Protein backbone atom coordinates (compact mmCIF):
# COMPACT_ATOMS: atom_id res chain seq x y z
CA UNK A 1 0.00 0.00 0.00
CA UNK A 2 2.83 2.33 0.86
CA UNK A 3 4.38 1.71 -2.56
CA UNK A 4 1.10 2.63 -4.30
CA UNK A 5 0.83 5.88 -2.35
CA UNK A 6 4.46 6.72 -3.09
CA UNK A 7 3.95 6.09 -6.80
CA UNK A 8 0.84 8.25 -6.91
CA UNK A 9 2.64 11.07 -5.07
CA UNK A 10 5.54 10.90 -7.51
CA UNK A 11 3.11 11.10 -10.44
CA UNK A 12 1.41 14.19 -9.03
CA UNK A 13 4.74 15.90 -8.47
CA UNK A 14 5.73 15.18 -12.05
CA UNK A 15 2.65 16.97 -13.48
CA UNK A 16 3.26 20.77 -13.93
CA UNK A 17 1.06 22.88 -11.70
CA UNK A 18 -1.63 24.81 -13.56
CA UNK A 19 -2.14 28.18 -11.94
CA UNK A 20 -4.41 31.02 -13.05
CA UNK A 21 -2.97 34.36 -14.14
CA UNK A 22 -2.25 36.66 -11.25
CA UNK A 23 -5.28 38.77 -10.50
CA UNK A 24 -5.12 42.45 -11.35
CA UNK A 25 -7.14 43.67 -8.40
CA UNK A 26 -7.17 47.40 -9.17
CA UNK A 27 -6.81 49.77 -12.11
CA UNK A 28 -3.19 49.93 -13.25
CA UNK A 29 -1.36 52.79 -14.95
CA UNK A 30 1.42 52.03 -17.43
CA UNK A 31 3.66 54.83 -18.73
CA UNK A 32 4.81 53.66 -22.16
CA UNK A 33 5.98 55.03 -25.51
CA UNK A 34 4.60 54.62 -28.99
CA UNK A 35 5.86 55.72 -32.38
CA UNK A 36 3.95 58.50 -34.17
CA UNK A 37 5.09 58.66 -37.81
CA UNK A 38 2.61 61.50 -38.39
CA UNK A 39 4.94 63.86 -36.49
CA UNK A 40 7.98 63.07 -38.64
CA UNK A 41 9.76 66.05 -40.20
CA UNK A 42 8.28 68.83 -38.05
CA UNK A 43 10.48 71.91 -37.84
CA UNK A 44 10.38 72.25 -34.05
CA UNK A 45 11.89 68.81 -33.69
CA UNK A 46 9.01 67.39 -31.66
CA UNK A 47 9.77 63.71 -31.21
CA UNK A 48 7.88 60.95 -33.00
CA UNK A 49 8.42 58.80 -29.90
CA UNK A 50 5.55 59.79 -27.64
CA UNK A 51 4.81 59.04 -24.04
CA UNK A 52 1.38 57.54 -23.41
CA UNK A 53 -0.41 56.63 -20.19
CA UNK A 54 -2.58 53.53 -20.48
CA UNK A 55 -4.90 52.54 -17.64
CA UNK A 56 -6.28 49.01 -17.64
CA UNK A 57 -9.23 48.07 -15.40
CA UNK A 58 -9.25 45.50 -12.60
CA UNK A 59 -9.29 41.97 -14.01
CA UNK A 60 -7.63 42.88 -17.31
CA UNK A 61 -4.71 40.48 -16.86
CA UNK A 62 -6.65 37.34 -15.98
CA UNK A 63 -9.69 37.87 -18.23
CA UNK A 64 -7.75 37.14 -21.39
CA UNK A 65 -10.83 36.52 -23.49
CA UNK A 66 -12.43 39.88 -22.73
CA UNK A 67 -12.18 42.99 -24.91
CA UNK A 68 -12.79 46.52 -23.68
CA UNK A 69 -14.10 49.88 -24.90
CA UNK A 70 -11.49 52.65 -24.84
CA UNK A 71 -11.75 56.25 -23.68
CA UNK A 72 -9.04 58.51 -25.06
CA UNK A 73 -8.29 61.62 -23.01
CA UNK A 74 -6.44 64.68 -24.37
CA UNK A 75 -4.67 66.82 -21.78
CA UNK A 76 -4.33 70.59 -21.70
CA UNK A 77 -1.61 73.10 -22.49
CA UNK A 78 1.61 73.88 -20.59
CA UNK A 79 2.22 70.81 -18.42
CA UNK A 80 3.69 67.54 -19.79
CA UNK A 81 1.67 64.35 -19.75
CA UNK A 82 3.22 62.99 -16.53
CA UNK A 83 2.18 66.10 -14.60
CA UNK A 84 -1.29 65.93 -16.13
CA UNK A 85 -1.72 62.32 -14.99
CA UNK A 86 -0.56 63.31 -11.51
CA UNK A 87 -3.35 65.87 -11.43
CA UNK A 88 -6.08 63.89 -13.21
CA UNK A 89 -5.43 60.42 -11.68
CA UNK A 90 -7.12 58.61 -14.53
CA UNK A 91 -6.63 55.34 -12.64
CA UNK A 92 -9.05 56.54 -9.97
CA UNK A 93 -11.69 57.14 -12.64
CA UNK A 94 -11.17 53.72 -14.23
CA UNK A 95 -11.30 52.06 -10.79
CA UNK A 96 -14.55 53.85 -9.88
CA UNK A 97 -16.10 52.93 -13.23
CA UNK A 98 -15.17 49.28 -12.72
CA UNK A 99 -16.68 49.27 -9.24
CA UNK A 100 -19.88 50.60 -10.81
CA UNK A 101 -19.86 47.71 -13.29
CA UNK A 102 -18.27 49.46 -16.29
CA UNK A 103 -14.79 48.42 -17.42
CA UNK A 104 -12.76 50.69 -19.70
CA UNK A 105 -9.25 51.06 -20.95
CA UNK A 106 -8.30 54.75 -20.67
CA UNK A 107 -5.51 56.30 -22.72
CA UNK A 108 -3.82 59.71 -22.46
CA UNK A 109 -1.13 60.56 -25.07
CA UNK A 110 1.56 63.21 -24.73
CA UNK A 111 0.36 66.33 -26.54
CA UNK A 112 3.41 68.39 -25.48
CA UNK A 113 5.59 70.27 -27.98
CA UNK A 114 8.66 72.48 -27.92
CA UNK A 115 6.30 75.36 -27.05
CA UNK A 116 4.29 73.23 -24.59
CA UNK A 117 1.41 72.12 -26.78
CA UNK A 118 0.58 71.10 -30.35
CA UNK A 119 -3.17 71.81 -29.91
CA UNK A 120 -3.94 68.45 -31.53
CA UNK A 121 -3.68 70.23 -34.86
CA UNK A 122 -1.58 69.83 -37.99
CA UNK A 123 1.14 72.01 -39.52
CA UNK A 124 4.76 71.93 -40.70
CA UNK A 125 6.25 73.83 -37.77
CA UNK A 126 4.68 71.82 -34.95
CA UNK A 127 3.76 68.58 -36.73
CA UNK A 128 0.60 66.59 -37.30
CA UNK A 129 -0.74 66.02 -33.78
CA UNK A 130 -4.22 65.46 -35.17
CA UNK A 131 -3.14 62.32 -37.05
CA UNK A 132 -0.91 61.34 -34.14
CA UNK A 133 -4.09 60.85 -32.11
CA UNK A 134 -6.57 59.71 -34.75
CA UNK A 135 -4.25 57.33 -36.61
CA UNK A 136 -0.99 56.45 -34.85
CA UNK A 137 -2.30 56.25 -31.29
CA UNK A 138 -5.55 54.43 -32.04
CA UNK A 139 -3.76 51.87 -34.20
CA UNK A 140 -1.09 51.31 -31.53
CA UNK A 141 -3.67 50.82 -28.78
CA UNK A 142 -5.77 48.43 -30.87
CA UNK A 143 -2.64 46.43 -31.75
CA UNK A 144 -1.27 46.18 -28.22
CA UNK A 145 -4.39 45.92 -26.04
CA UNK A 146 -7.54 43.83 -26.06
CA UNK A 147 -9.82 46.57 -27.31
CA UNK A 148 -13.18 46.58 -28.99
CA UNK A 149 -11.63 48.02 -32.14
CA UNK A 150 -14.71 49.76 -33.44
CA UNK A 151 -15.78 53.44 -33.40
CA UNK A 152 -18.88 52.49 -31.41
CA UNK A 153 -16.57 51.45 -28.56
CA UNK A 154 -14.23 54.46 -28.71
CA UNK A 155 -14.78 57.73 -26.86
CA UNK A 156 -12.76 60.94 -26.98
CA UNK A 157 -12.57 63.52 -24.21
CA UNK A 158 -10.22 66.33 -23.24
CA UNK A 159 -9.64 69.32 -21.01
CA UNK A 160 -8.82 72.88 -22.15
CA UNK A 161 -6.43 72.44 -25.12
CA UNK A 162 -7.64 68.84 -25.08
CA UNK A 163 -11.26 70.00 -25.17
CA UNK A 164 -10.40 71.95 -28.31
CA UNK A 165 -8.66 68.89 -29.73
CA UNK A 166 -11.72 66.78 -28.98
CA UNK A 167 -13.97 69.05 -31.05
CA UNK A 168 -11.40 69.40 -33.81
CA UNK A 169 -10.76 65.68 -34.23
CA UNK A 170 -14.48 64.87 -34.05
CA UNK A 171 -15.07 67.26 -36.93
CA UNK A 172 -11.96 66.66 -39.02
CA UNK A 173 -11.62 62.90 -38.48
CA UNK A 174 -15.12 61.41 -38.31
CA UNK A 175 -15.74 57.70 -37.98
CA UNK A 176 -13.01 57.04 -35.42
CA UNK A 177 -14.73 58.06 -32.17
CA UNK A 178 -18.46 57.69 -31.67
CA UNK A 179 -18.93 59.89 -28.58
CA UNK A 180 -17.12 62.96 -27.27
CA UNK A 181 -16.90 64.97 -24.05
CA UNK A 182 -15.36 68.48 -24.01
CA UNK A 183 -14.18 69.86 -20.65
CA UNK A 184 -13.53 73.62 -20.32
CA UNK A 185 -12.45 73.81 -23.95
CA UNK A 186 -10.09 76.55 -25.08
CA UNK A 187 -9.60 78.17 -28.47
CA UNK A 188 -13.22 77.94 -29.63
CA UNK A 189 -13.67 81.49 -30.90
CA UNK A 190 -11.42 83.07 -33.57
CA UNK A 191 -8.09 84.13 -32.11
CA UNK A 192 -6.60 87.41 -33.25
CA UNK A 193 -3.20 89.06 -33.18
CA UNK A 194 -2.46 92.80 -33.44
CA UNK A 195 0.44 94.59 -35.09
CA UNK A 196 1.73 95.38 -31.59
CA UNK A 197 1.59 91.67 -30.65
CA UNK A 198 3.39 90.76 -33.85
CA UNK A 199 6.15 93.34 -33.28
CA UNK A 200 6.68 92.11 -29.73
CA UNK A 201 6.95 88.47 -30.82
CA UNK A 202 9.27 89.34 -33.70
CA UNK A 203 11.58 91.09 -31.24
CA UNK A 204 11.81 88.24 -28.74
CA UNK A 205 15.02 86.28 -28.25
CA UNK A 206 15.18 82.52 -27.80
CA UNK A 207 15.75 83.00 -24.06
CA UNK A 208 12.76 85.33 -23.78
CA UNK A 209 10.54 82.79 -25.53
CA UNK A 210 11.84 79.99 -23.32
CA UNK A 211 11.02 82.03 -20.21
CA UNK A 212 7.68 83.41 -21.40
CA UNK A 213 4.67 83.10 -19.11
CA UNK A 214 1.59 81.00 -19.88
CA UNK A 215 -0.31 83.64 -21.88
CA UNK A 216 2.75 84.87 -23.76
CA UNK A 217 3.93 81.43 -24.79
CA UNK A 218 0.42 80.24 -25.66
CA UNK A 219 0.15 83.03 -28.24
CA UNK A 220 3.44 81.92 -29.79
CA UNK A 221 2.48 78.25 -29.66
CA UNK A 222 -0.82 78.83 -31.43
CA UNK A 223 0.94 80.89 -34.10
CA UNK A 224 3.42 78.05 -34.61
CA UNK A 225 0.49 75.66 -34.97
CA UNK A 226 -1.96 77.67 -37.07
CA UNK A 227 0.19 80.31 -38.79
CA UNK A 228 3.45 78.51 -39.60
CA UNK A 229 6.21 79.87 -41.79
CA UNK A 230 8.54 76.96 -42.57
CA UNK A 231 10.73 79.09 -44.87
CA UNK A 232 10.96 82.07 -42.52
CA UNK A 233 14.30 83.38 -41.27
CA UNK A 234 13.25 83.60 -37.61
CA UNK A 235 13.90 80.76 -35.19
CA UNK A 236 10.18 80.45 -34.35
CA UNK A 237 9.18 79.59 -37.91
CA UNK A 238 5.88 81.43 -37.53
CA UNK A 239 4.18 84.06 -39.66
CA UNK A 240 3.24 86.90 -37.33
CA UNK A 241 1.83 88.95 -40.20
CA UNK A 242 4.08 91.93 -39.39
CA UNK A 243 4.85 93.91 -42.55
CA UNK A 244 7.76 96.25 -43.25
CA UNK A 245 5.61 99.34 -42.68
CA UNK A 246 4.58 98.10 -39.25
CA UNK A 247 1.06 97.11 -40.25
CA UNK A 248 -0.40 93.64 -40.00
CA UNK A 249 -1.07 91.37 -42.95
CA UNK A 250 -4.70 90.30 -42.39
CA UNK A 251 -3.85 86.82 -43.68
CA UNK A 252 -2.47 85.84 -40.28
CA UNK A 253 -5.81 86.42 -38.58
CA UNK A 254 -7.60 84.62 -41.40
CA UNK A 255 -5.42 81.59 -40.69
CA UNK A 256 -6.13 81.76 -36.97
CA UNK A 257 -9.87 82.05 -37.59
CA UNK A 258 -9.73 79.08 -39.95
CA UNK A 259 -8.87 76.89 -36.94
CA UNK A 260 -11.72 78.13 -34.74
CA UNK A 261 -14.45 75.52 -34.10
CA UNK A 262 -17.03 78.31 -34.00
CA UNK A 263 -16.01 79.31 -37.55
CA UNK A 264 -15.66 75.73 -38.78
CA UNK A 265 -18.96 74.52 -37.31
CA UNK A 266 -21.30 74.98 -40.33
CA UNK A 267 -18.91 72.93 -42.50
CA UNK A 268 -19.00 69.95 -40.13
CA UNK A 269 -22.63 69.62 -39.11
CA UNK A 270 -22.99 66.08 -40.52
CA UNK A 271 -19.96 64.95 -38.53
CA UNK A 272 -21.22 66.36 -35.24
CA UNK A 273 -24.79 65.24 -35.83
CA UNK A 274 -23.49 61.78 -36.65
CA UNK A 275 -22.05 61.28 -33.17
CA UNK A 276 -23.71 58.82 -30.84
CA UNK A 277 -23.37 61.35 -28.01
CA UNK A 278 -21.82 64.79 -27.46
CA UNK A 279 -21.38 66.41 -24.06
CA UNK A 280 -19.52 69.38 -22.66
CA UNK A 281 -19.11 71.20 -19.36
CA UNK A 282 -17.39 74.18 -17.76
CA UNK A 283 -17.11 75.78 -14.34
CA UNK A 284 -19.05 78.95 -13.54
CA UNK A 285 -15.81 80.77 -12.64
CA UNK A 286 -13.79 79.55 -15.63
CA UNK A 287 -12.02 82.26 -17.62
CA UNK A 288 -13.19 80.49 -20.80
CA UNK A 289 -16.86 80.80 -19.93
CA UNK A 290 -17.73 83.37 -22.62
CA UNK A 291 -16.21 81.58 -25.64
CA UNK A 292 -17.89 78.38 -24.45
CA UNK A 293 -21.20 80.26 -24.33
CA UNK A 294 -20.65 81.46 -27.90
CA UNK A 295 -19.83 77.91 -29.00
CA UNK A 296 -23.05 76.62 -27.48
CA UNK A 297 -24.97 79.47 -29.04
CA UNK A 298 -23.76 78.39 -32.48
CA UNK A 299 -24.43 74.72 -31.76
CA UNK A 300 -27.99 75.67 -30.85
CA UNK A 301 -28.34 77.89 -33.92
CA UNK A 302 -27.42 75.02 -36.23
CA UNK A 303 -29.46 72.43 -34.34
CA UNK A 304 -26.64 70.25 -33.05
CA UNK A 305 -27.74 67.97 -30.23
CA UNK A 306 -25.47 67.95 -27.14
CA UNK A 307 -25.58 67.79 -23.36
CA UNK A 308 -24.19 70.62 -21.25
CA UNK A 309 -23.52 71.24 -17.57
CA UNK A 310 -22.44 74.43 -15.85
CA UNK A 311 -20.97 73.52 -12.49
CA UNK A 312 -19.46 75.39 -9.55
CA UNK A 313 -15.74 75.64 -10.18
CA UNK A 314 -12.91 77.28 -12.10
CA UNK A 315 -10.75 76.10 -14.99
CA UNK A 316 -9.05 73.23 -13.20
CA UNK A 317 -10.10 72.73 -9.60
CA UNK A 318 -12.69 69.98 -10.24
CA UNK A 319 -11.42 68.20 -13.35
CA UNK A 320 -10.03 65.16 -11.50
CA UNK A 321 -13.35 64.68 -9.72
CA UNK A 322 -15.46 65.17 -12.83
CA UNK A 323 -13.50 62.70 -14.96
CA UNK A 324 -14.47 60.13 -12.35
CA UNK A 325 -18.07 61.23 -11.67
CA UNK A 326 -19.19 62.63 -15.03
CA UNK A 327 -16.94 61.73 -17.95
CA UNK A 328 -16.63 57.96 -17.53
CA UNK A 329 -20.30 57.55 -16.52
CA UNK A 330 -21.18 59.40 -19.76
CA UNK A 331 -19.14 56.93 -21.81
CA UNK A 332 -20.55 54.00 -19.82
CA UNK A 333 -23.96 55.07 -21.10
CA UNK A 334 -22.96 55.53 -24.73
CA UNK A 335 -20.08 53.19 -25.73
CA UNK A 336 -20.71 49.66 -26.95
CA UNK A 337 -19.27 47.06 -24.58
CA UNK A 338 -19.80 43.92 -26.67
CA UNK A 339 -18.41 42.79 -30.02
CA UNK A 340 -20.95 43.28 -32.78
Image (cartoon, rainbow, N blue to C red):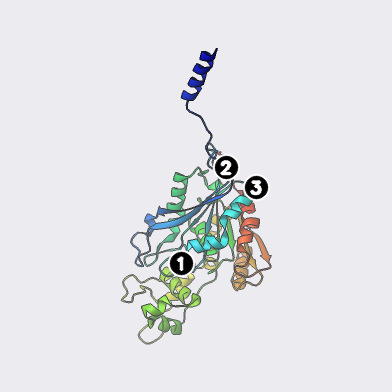
Read off the residue under disc 3.
99
Question: Looking at the image, is mark 1 or mark 3 earlier in the sequence?
Answer: 3
Q: Would residue 311 be found to the left or right of residue 171 on screen?
A: right
Q: Quadrant of the C terminus?
A: top right
Q: CA distance from mark 2 to mark 1?
A: 34 Å
Read off the residue under disc 1.
117
- Asked which quadrant contains residue 197, the reply is bottom left
Q: Residues within 10 Å of mark 3 (few under 14, many from 20)?
A: few
Residue 267 sits above or below residue 63 on the image: below
The spot of residue 55 in percent (x, y) is 53, 51
Callout 1 secondary element: loop
- Asked which quadrant contains residue 42, the reply is bottom left
Q: Would residue 255 be found to the left or right of residue 100 on screen?
A: left
Q: Residue at x 65, y 68 (%)?
A: 283
Callout 3 secondary element: helix
Question: Looking at the image, is mark 3 or mark 2 earlier in the sequence?
Answer: 2
The spot of residue 6 in percent (x, y) is 51, 18
Q: Residue at x 59, y 58 (%)?
A: 181
The spot of residue 336 in percent (x, y) is 59, 44
Amino acid sequence: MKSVIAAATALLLAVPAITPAAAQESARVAELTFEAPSLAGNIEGNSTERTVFVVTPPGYDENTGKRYPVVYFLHGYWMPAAAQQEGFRLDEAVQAASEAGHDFIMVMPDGFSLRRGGFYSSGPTVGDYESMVADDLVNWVDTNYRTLADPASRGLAGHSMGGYGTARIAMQRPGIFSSIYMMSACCLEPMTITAEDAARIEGMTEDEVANADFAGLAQISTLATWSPDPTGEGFLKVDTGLQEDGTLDPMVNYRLAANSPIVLLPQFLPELNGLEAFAMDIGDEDFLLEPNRLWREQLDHFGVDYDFELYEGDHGNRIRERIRTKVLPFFAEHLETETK
